[in-house]
Image (cartoon, grey):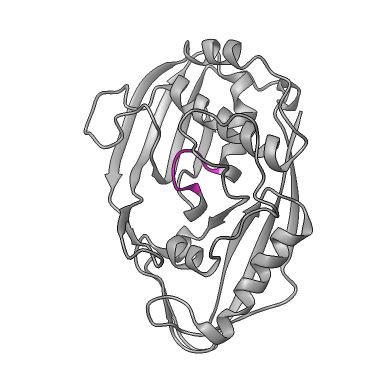
Amino acid sequence: MLFRLCAHRFEFRVLDSVYFPPGKAGNVLRGTLGMIAAPGEPKIAKLPSGLAKPPRPFVLRASHLDGKRFGPDEAFSFDVNIFDLRAPVSERIEESFSQLAHTGLGPWRGRVELLKPVIVTPVDLDLSPAALEAVENPERITILFHTPTELKGTASREKGSRDDVPFGILFARIRDRIATLRSIYGEGPLPLDFQALSRRADLVRTLRCDLQHREVFRRSSRTGEVHGIGGFIGSAEYEGDVAEFLPWLRAAWWTGVGRYTVWGNGVIEVVVR
């Protein structure tokens, strides 16, 4: 029961000066990619609740560049995780980044040179319980929300109770995202009893939430409208029979979870206690 992707590391040499505004490195880079999607705009019969169209076949990993400035001849890098392993998607992304030597990047429109070769790392993730080590049977885990995360069904914008992020809701959003990406871009639907999984996830208890909301806004280059792409960051601690969910939680490090994942939102990390 594999979920496959390729992590691409893009490295650049700065020709002019480049600036990534705080919280907006992903937005700056996303703008260079335009409307890239998989060839033929893939369709599936039924999308999970809350999705009006298929997700993009990639996510950016560039939050480490937020607020950074780079001068001429300095270098920087970031990752793009690509879920559609057919060549045209990765080739179109690489071509778009190659154009930055002419079009420039960021609010200063500083030119940057893409260095070759691009580093490509195939990643195969086993979602089955067999992926766990024999000694790995924790009863308590902590989830770290590294980048702004917004989940449908949670009170993410409020200073709330310890139940701000129920485990069942978090897992449902992870499950739906991974299943959708695999159905569209990978080996097809997962052979799982989703309802049974959800019932077991709902039994995992929330012990503590320590979350802060982070406001981030972006302006659409196409319409000029301003949109919020913020969410909560921080941590949440859970207790219960969590072992079978660990492969999914670890896969979400690569895929992101919630809204605005293309920009790099929803990066989570699971810490086993």
| Residue at 57% in and 35% down | 177
Query: Which quadrant of the figure has residue 116?
Result: bottom right
Residue 160, percent from left and from top: 23, 28
The image shows residue 63, relative to residue 19, as above or below, that is: above
The mark tally for this picture is: 0
Outermost residue on the left side: it is 159
Q: Residue at x 53, y 43 (%)?
A: 256
Residue 206 placement, left or right of 134:
left
Q: Is residue 139 magenta?
A: no
Q: Nearer the viewer, residue 113 or 194?
A: 194
Q: Can you give x and y, in whole percent of width and height, for residue 271 in the image? A: 52, 33
Q: Quadrant of residue 117?
A: bottom right
Q: Residue at x 60, y 45 (%)?
A: 254
Choose between 22 and 151: the one closer to the eye. 151
In this view, 198 is above or below 5 = above
Residue 29 lies, in percent from the top left, at: 50, 66
Q: Quadrant of the N terminus?
A: top right
Q: Residue at x 74, y 27 (%)?
A: 131
In the rendered image, residue 165, in percent from the top left (x then y), is placed at: 37, 27
144 vs 180, left or right, is left
Q: Main secondary structure of the magenta part?
A: loop
| Residue range (magenta) | 256-261
Above or below residue 130? Residue 182 is below
Comparing 245 with 151, the one in front is 151
Asked whether residue 257 is drawn in magenta, I would say: yes
